[in-house]
Image (cartoon, grey):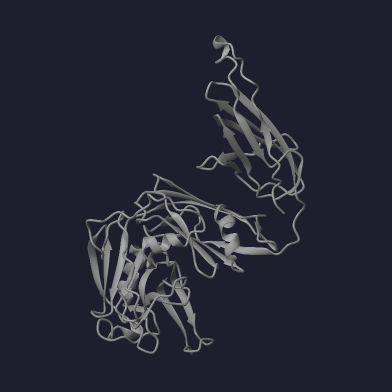
Amino acid sequence: MTIAATPLVLVGCTADHLPGARQANAAPPQLTVTPGNQSKDVPISAEVGTAVKGGKITAVRLTDDKGAQVPAEPREDGSSWVPARPLQNSRTYTAEVTATGDKGKTATQKTTFTTAAKSTKPEVTSVLNFTGDQTYGTAMPVVVTFDPAIPKEARADVQRRLFVKTDPPQPGTWSWLADGKQVEYRAPDFWKPGTKISVRSALEGLPIGKDAIGDADRSGTSKIGRQVSLDIDNASKQMSVYEDGKLLRKIPVSLGKPSTPTSSGNMVIMEKFEYTTFNTMGDPNGGYIVDVEDAQRLTDGGEFIHAAPWSEGDQGYTNVSHGCTNVSNANADWLMRTTQVGDLVTVKGTEVTLDQGNGWTAWNVGWDEFAKGSALPVPAGLKPTVSATPHPGVVAGGSAPAPARSNSGG
């Protein structure tokens, strides 16, 4: 189902040709509003489209069939007003739009439309990684994951319904993985500490292609905490922990042994567990069940930083793990108290490189490559800041370099 395209046009009257009456009889603005009046079967994801010539939109009021006002706010480009929540199925809504012309003349247009009944089409499941009332690290990307994947021809429509606001402003862009299973958002540079970020994945009822609809409307507002980053070097078997570009601690590590190597690349801490159980009995290279403490996830594939008292004698010298980063109990406990979800973790010098989409990999490519993944135009002025502090330990506001794309790591 699509929004009816019949526009509502208010055309100005012919101007009075008397010189003294030109301003008083100036033509009002030309106003076009969608959905068209008396439209039926409108998706509940509908927005009030507004286009005006000879003026600007000065008021939009959306009400339901009981007279209750529906909160809405304009898109940044002014192309439409977006309801703050999904519309309801099989309901009638009225939008009243007012535009003011260059000479002060106004034009007001109403349109009434009815939303579609609840769809029987299958829903695309979406998962938003960004929740409310959290404190995230400066490399935290906003990630939406889809099942099934979003076809290429539908990605622009989906992307238009994904909203990110930052205070203070720090614009970025969305970027799709090639298979359409995930889309990530970040700015050219790391978030500045103290930034408030509000996210909305407004997909409920959105037509996705011809055969599916979006599943839910999700949102969250959180803040960015202090800048912390972890650099792990396979050559030295050491982890360097930085805060605001200053070295806090060096920690001996044991990485994945050659048969199960750790991935090299730029990752982000995804979740943290004081206690968890690793069960690899179903994996091709698995075959163990072990309880671990102070575990921090880096990839979907199961790479963690965690306490490994059994390998403390190897830490700093030999790689013996199944792909995780092993540290001592004391260091794992300190890391859990120091890091945040969304902190950058860079691993270099191992036998394999990180696959895009194996975790939150928005920082695993440079900005230009990341921006190419957007299904909508990216503002040309969005570019990374050249940081005076080189990586590792780059302070927030700078951007991480893309890792070397070779089997020897970055």
Q: Nearer the viewer, residue 207 or 136?
A: 207
Q: Nearer the viewer, residue 372 or 22?
A: 22
Q: Residue at x 72, y 34 (%)?
A: 67
> In the figure, is residue 311 to the left or right of 153?
left
Residue 123 lies, with reference to residue 90, above or below; the image says below
In the rendered view of the protein, which quadrant contains the C terminus?
A: bottom left
Residue 245 lies, with reference to residue 64, above or below; the image says below
Residue 236 lies, with reference to residue 20, above or below; the image says below
> Residue 340, can we see it?
no
Q: Position of residue 166 (x, y in %)?
A: 43, 47
Q: Position of residue 80 (x, y in %)?
A: 58, 41
In the rendered view of the protein, which quadrant contains the N terminus?
A: bottom right
Counting every numbered tag in the picture gives 0
> Residue 222, can we see it?
yes
Q: Position of residue 339 (x, y in %)?
A: 35, 63
Q: Quadrant of residue 62?
A: top right
Q: Residue at x 59, y 55 (%)?
A: 157
Q: Nearer the viewer, residue 74 or 37?
A: 37
Q: Residue at x 44, y 70 (%)?
A: 273
Q: Residue at x 43, y 59 (%)?
A: 371
Q: Quadrant of residue 141?
A: bottom left
> In the figure, is residue 210 to the left or right of 329?
right
Q: Nearer the viewer, residue 226 or 63?
A: 63
